[in-house]
Image (cartoon, rainbow, N blue to C red):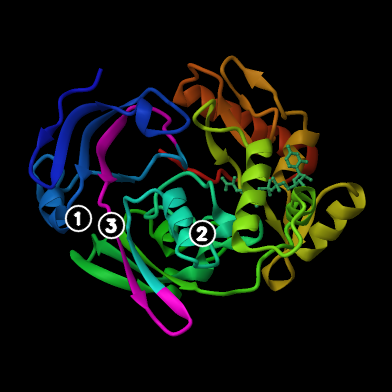
Amino acid sequence: MNNEPVDMGGFQLTSDAAMGRRNTLRVDARARLLAEVHDVTRLPEVLAYPAIAGGKVLVLGEGSNLLIRGDIDATVLAIANRGVETFQRDDHVLVRVAAGERWDDFVRWSLGQGLAGLENLILIPGTVGASPIQNIGAYGVEVAEFIDTVEAWDTQQAEFVILDKAACAFSYRHSTFKQQAGRWIVVAVTFRLPRERPLSLDYAGIAEEMEAMGVQRPTPYHVAEAVIRLRSRKLPDPAVIGNAGSFFKNPIVGAVQADAMALAHPGLPAWPHAGGTAKLSAGWLIEAAGFKGARDGDAGMSNRHALVLVNHGKATGPQLWAFAQKVIAGVEAMFGITLEPEPQVV
Ligand code: EPU
């Protein structure tokens, strides 16, 4: 049961709020207070509200990259502003998108406008405001490439700020927003989208999928369709089975360890990474350690993709977290590599 929200004009407050429908792992937890903010200009007032000021605040989008380990003794801040504005430039368009917009809706809209770049990132769950935090990426593209600026409330300086791309310090599934967690509340993201751009077709599976589709001259639409087909086949749909996408990051190891791993495990996929390091496939490691499709009760790893933690029904936060720990321990025992969770764990 949810308590009735109280409308404060531009934002709504709900005490002892049910979170089950607000996280895609479908963990049935409660939050001390939920503040849903439609008008972000009121954020300073929301944060100064007596029940909120000075306490812990957890910012939430669609809850698609989150594991809730227990009831949340904090204010959950759901940023629910909407709107898209465009600014035409010579060879590109600047698109300012409210943080509360759904990422996938925005990708489809951008393709409909004839803008290129985001086609590889179609069908990623979550909101636009969450996209810079973990620098979402898929099929050889990371969102950082298209971000111009991020607008946020800076809780340290108590003011709205605009961070340019360099200030965001993006890297693989990482940014300054994750580094200094809790400091910024993202309210809008401005993307710089070209009208034309070479397609990114290198990631394994894309070219094969296009061939199967009979595509001769690929456009961004074809790439999007190929990605939809690949994702639908490989990744469990959160609408059908609770999950938060990849639960672990692909581990990054130094050159020496990468060579040793390649020698010992010839099948292990590895990609060259910054500064001579290598990114190894966590999915492969988890499958090789015997966890693909494994489960304890309702908590387990997907039988479609070993990297995805799934809730088969009524798994609790602690049960899901315990299973994740079991996977970390199993992979560490077999390969000496410690996997790190990719979603936010609260
Ligand atoms: N693999 C296995 N077993 C599995 C799954 C994968 O052995 O059960 C091996 C296969 O060799 C496969 C390789 O891993 O070819 C790579 O798999 P995949 O293409 O699915 O990519 P990934 O590295 O497992 C990453 C992202 C995904 C993103 C895909 C596609 C991370 C943590 N995950 O997964 O992002 O969709 O690439 O680009 O980087 C997410 O972040 O939530 C997410 C789903």
Check disc 2 and give the amino acid type: His
Which residue is more in the foreground, 43 or 74?
A: 43
Q: Earlier in the sequence, mark 3 or mark 2?
A: 3
Residue visible at 21% across and 67% down in the picture: 160
Q: Is mark 1 within 8 Å of ligand 1?
A: no
In the picture as drawn, the residue positioned furthest to the bottom comes out as 90
Q: Residues within 10 Å of mark 1 (few under 14, many from 20)?
A: many
Q: Residues within 10 Å of mark 3 (few under 14, many from 20)?
A: few
Horizontal arrangement in the rendering, residue 159 relative to residue 132 (left or right): left
Closest to the camera, between mark 3 and mark 2, is 3
Q: From where the camera sits, is residue 85 visible?
A: yes
Q: Position of residue 173 (x, y in %)?
A: 54, 56
Q: Name the amino acid type tagged 1.
A: Val
In the rendered image, the quadrant that contains the N terminus is top left
Q: Would you name the residue on which mark 1 appears?
A: 40
Q: CA distance from mark 2 to mark 1?
A: 25 Å
Report the front residue among 53 and 41. Answer: 41
Element marked by disc 3 = loop
The one nearer the camera, 88 or 246, is 88
